[in-house]
Image (tube, rainbow, N blue to C red):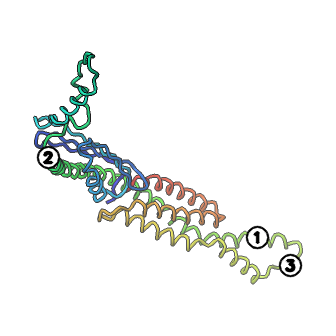
């Protein structure tokens, strides 16, 4: 069954005194696009998160929001005492003799580069964050894909209904098409006989047959009907195929090809009923093209 490109997934966890939360939001996009928002401590994991998303999702615009909040004592940054003393020595040494030294703002000192350092070993913190974050992204993807599949099921029902409406119109055109040449032959014979009635002349059957044959060849839509039926069959097969492969672009292509054949039928046939049916088919195809823009 097909999947929609619209979806939402989220997952949260608490590990080693840190709360993690991942949110995924996807909307339709012709290609695959990722927008990541992650806290600075998690930036080294950005490439791994993107790679994981590319394995699970194939199309759409994906917005990822990751938050973390540390609640343990390990969250406190450590003061680099040697760096702080070096800054104080530099300040004291730079102040002229005989002048009162101003009060030193501790907050300003702590904001100097290198005075505050992240707690613990950076590699250890990185591995700890990876072990917590990547499984969360997997769970959020599961949640997202479940929603995409639910919406895709509804999309599939709509697309099949539209495709079957097109198929019923094609059947009517196929039934109506052979009568077009026959009716033309009768109209042509009647007009010729009316014109030649006063001249006491008779029509040549061979000439009439030749004219009707040329006309029948010009308005014949059998090939277009066959191709249109083939596109409809392929379209329905892709919609109902349960292998989970992305089919959105294939469905868009088939919709374009169906529209091409419908336009040709409308331009070739002079019959009012066939033209009306072709217009209805094109209306259903337009609705299909709108729907397939949100199919993964």
- 10 Å neighbourhood of mark 2: few (<14), some, or many (≥20)? few
Rounded to the nearest whole Å, what is the CA distance between mark 3 and mark 2? 109 Å
Q: Position of residue 179 (x, y in %)?
A: 61, 70
Do the CB atoms of the residues marked 3 and 1 lie less than 8 Å apart?
no
| Residue picked out by circle 1 | 190
Regarding residue 45, the answer to whether it shows in the image is yes
Between 231 and 14, the one lying in front of the other is: 14
Whichever of callouts 3 and 2 sits on the residue coming sooner in the sequence is: 2
Mark 1 crowdedness (10 Å alpha carbons): few <14, some 14-19, many ≥20:
few
Q: Tell me the quadrant of the picture where the C terminus can be found.
A: bottom left
Closest to the camera, between mark 3 and mark 2, is: 2
- Position above or below: 216 against 264: below
- Tag in front: 2 or 1: 2
Q: Quadrant of the N terminus?
A: bottom left
Vertical arrangement, residue 102 with respect to residue 268, above or below: above
Q: For the residue labelled by badge 3, is the local secondary structure a helix, a strand or a loop?
A: loop
Q: CA distance from mark 3 to mark 1?
A: 14 Å
Residue 201's tag is 3
* Extreme-front residue of the structure: 97
Question: Which is nearer the N-term, disc 2 or disc 1?
Answer: 2
Between 275 and 85, the one lying in front of the other is 85
Instruction: Residue at 51% x, 65% y: name it.
Output: 257
Q: Is residue 155 left or right of residue 122?
A: right
Q: How many marks?
A: 3
Residue 212 is situated, as x and y percent measured from the top left of the image, at 70, 76
Q: According to the image, label 2 marks what residue?
A: 121
């Amino acid at each position: 069954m097909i999947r929609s490109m619209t979806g939402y997934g989220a997952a949260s966890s608490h590990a080693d005194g840190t709360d993690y939360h991942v949110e995924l939001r996807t909307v339709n996009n012709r290609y695959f696009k990722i927008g990541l928002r992650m806290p600075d401590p998690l930036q080294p994991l950005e490439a791994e998160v993107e790679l994981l998303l590319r394995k699970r999702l194939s199309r759409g615009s994906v917005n990822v929001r990751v938050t973390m909040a540390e609640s343990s004592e390990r969250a406190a940054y450590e003061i680099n005492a040697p760096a702080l003393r070096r800054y104080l020595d530099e300040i004291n040494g730079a102040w002229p003799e005989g002048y009162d030294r101003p009060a030193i703002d501790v907050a300003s000192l702590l904001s100097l580069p290198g005075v505050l350092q992240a707690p613990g070993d950076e590699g250890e913190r990185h591995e700890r964050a990876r072990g917590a974050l990547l499984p969360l992204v997997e769970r959020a993807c599961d949640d997202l894909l479940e929603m995409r599949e639910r919406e895709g099921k509804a999309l599939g029902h709509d697309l099949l209904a539209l495709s079957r409406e097109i198929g019923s119109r094609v059947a009517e055109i196929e039934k109506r098409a052979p009568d077009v040449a026959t009716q033309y032959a009768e109209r042509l014979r009647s007009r010729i006989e009316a014109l030649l009635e006063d001249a006491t002349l008779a029509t040549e059957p061979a000439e009439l047959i030749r004219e009707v044959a040329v006309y029948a060849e010009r308005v014949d839509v059998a090939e277009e009907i066959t191709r249109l039926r083939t596109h409809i069959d392929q379209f329905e097969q892709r919609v109902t195929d349960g292998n989970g492969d992305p089919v959105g672009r294939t469905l868009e292509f088939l919709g374009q090809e169906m529209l091409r054949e419908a336009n040709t039928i409308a331009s070739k046939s002079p019959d009012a009923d066939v033209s009306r049916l072709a217009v209805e088919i094109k209306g259903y195809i337009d609705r299909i093209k709108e729907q397939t823009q949100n199919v993964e």
